[in-house]
Image: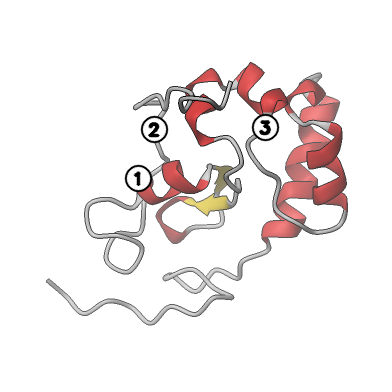
């Protein structure tokens, strides 16, 4: 296995600067312009406006029911293969995108709609 590239918290393994807060604002605005504003709750919109990472909540699960078991998790931007292309993935799904090997050895694909994460007992 080749040595892992040097990774800093501010860049991807390919050197792309992480601009997650700005990426979330752009995505929020695009969803609004395209008529998909219902994806984000009032709380997640407030978080994005403050430069914070939104979380999986009931509003998110209405659109992405496969994430029901991930309620409360952060939804960071995932840089596909370390590129400027970003997609929002809940923490668990984000880690799954980097398997096998984890963040250090696997640059990560686009993520997957499966497996579905059913609601946790008592979380409904």
In the visual, does 19 lie left or right of 47? left
In the shown orientation, is residue 119 left or right of residue 101?
right
x, y percentage for residue 86?
Answer: 57, 48
Q: Secondary structure at mark 1?
A: helix
SS at circle 3: loop
Question: Which percent across, then down, holds residue 123?
Answer: 56, 27
Q: Indicate whether 45 appears above or below 48.
A: above
Image disc number at residue 37: none
- Residue that appears at 40% across and 55% down: 81
Residue 83 or residue 44, whichever sits in front: 44
Furthest-left residue in this view: 1
Q: Which residue is mark 1?
A: 96
Q: Earlier in the sequence, mark 1 or mark 2?
A: 1
Residue count near mark 1 (Cα–Cα under 10 Å), binned few <14, some 14–19, many ≥20: many
Q: CA distance from mark 3 to mark 1?
A: 20 Å
In front of the other: 36 or 119: 119
Could you tell me which quadrant the C terminus lies in? top right
């Amino acid at each position: 296995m080749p040595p892992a590239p040097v990774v800093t918290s501010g860049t991807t393994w390919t050197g792309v600067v992480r601009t997650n807060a700005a990426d979330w604002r752009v995505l929020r605005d695009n969803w609004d312009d395209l008529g998909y504003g219902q994806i984000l709750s009032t709380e997640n919109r407030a978080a994005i406006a403050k430069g914070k990472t939104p979380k999986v909540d009931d509003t998110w699960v209405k659109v992405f029911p496969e994430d029901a078991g991930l309620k409360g998790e952060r939804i960071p931007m995932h840089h596909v293969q370390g590129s400027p292309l970003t997609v929002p993935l809940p923490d668990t799904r984000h880690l799954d995108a980097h398997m096998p090997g984890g963040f250090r050895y696997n640059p990560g694909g686009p993520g997957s709609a499966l497996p579905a994460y059913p609601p946790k007992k008592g979380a409904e």
